[in-house]
Amino acid sequence: MTRRFEGNSLVVATHNKGKLEEIQALLEPFGIKLTSNSDHDLPEPEETETTFVGNARIKAHAAAKATGLPALADDSGLSVDALGGAPGVYTADWAETPNGRDFVMAMKKTWEKLEAINAPYPRTAQFRCTLVLAWPDGHDEVFEGVMPGQLVWPMRGDQGHGYDPIFQPEGFDITFGEMDRWEKNKISHRADAFNKLVKGCFA
């Protein structure tokens, strides 16, 4: 049996304001007070795992332990089939530069790797999101969401973030980068994981 969420306060284990807003919109019907790592002055824990679920667990349990409140964390990224699932948990790392993250560079790098191995078309990929809801007693519930699609070149659109301009979701002829943010949020990997979380723990 999935453990139900019974309280009215939840920590979202992130410092990302955009992510907090997205989660606020999704959980609004349940009248839960959301705070983030920033509100509690929590540091970012070291993400030492090699899987999405492993890293989400680290973040959720660290926040739950530090605050004594249930905490929700996500770890998400892009898995490219022809690259053996890379960049995967290293999705953001591929964009790292000495001056911050450069996702245009990361998208070029991804496409160049596909070109180098002459990967066949369609160049299928999935955005993956793993959510972990952790309680201070150490219990957790895990929900995984997937958005299948393919990578396209050149980049298209300036909406969204990360690798969105080269990701064309299955069943659409536009990229996430060309899609309205709230439209994307309805069909994304994060929405898929959230629907499962809400059904499992909140509804």
Image (tube, grey):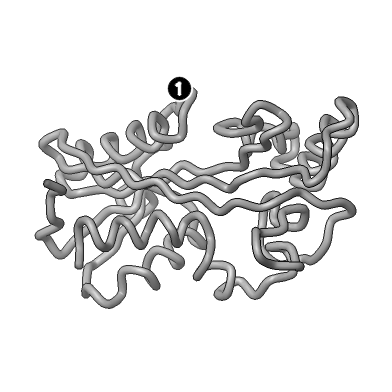
Q: In screen coordinates, is 48 left or right of 58?
A: right
Seen at 86% across and 25% down, the residue is 117
Labels in figure, total = 1
Q: Position of residue 184 (x, y in %)?
A: 58, 68
Q: Amino acid at mark 1?
A: Thr
Query: Residue beneath label 1, please?
Result: 48
Residue 65 or residue 41, whichever sits in front: 65
Q: In screen coordinates, is 156 left or right of 189?
A: right
Residue 161 or residue 66, whichever sits in front: 161
Please tell me whether residue 180 is drawn above or below residue 14 in the rendered image.
below
Seen at 21% across and 39% down, the residue is 140
- Near mark 1 (Cα within 10 A), the count class, few <14, some 14-19 or many ≥20, is few
Q: Position of residue 52 (x, y in %)?
A: 46, 35
Q: In screen coordinates, is 170 left or right of 131?
A: right
Q: Position of residue 148 (x, y in %)?
A: 60, 51
Please tell me whether residue 59 is drawn above or below residue 127 in the rendered image.
above
Image quadrant assignment for residue 155? bottom right
Please tell me whether residue 81 is drawn above or below residue 144 in the rendered image.
above
Disc 1, SS:
loop
Residue 171 or residue 77, whichever sits in front: 171
Image quadrant assignment for residue 57? top left
Seen at 10% across and 59% down, the residue is 6
Residue 145 or residue 92, whichever sits in front: 145
Q: In screen coordinates, is 57 left or right of 55?
A: left
Q: Position of residue 34 (x, y in %)?
A: 29, 63
Question: Quadrant location of the C terminus?
Answer: bottom left
Seen at 66% across and 44% down, the residue is 125
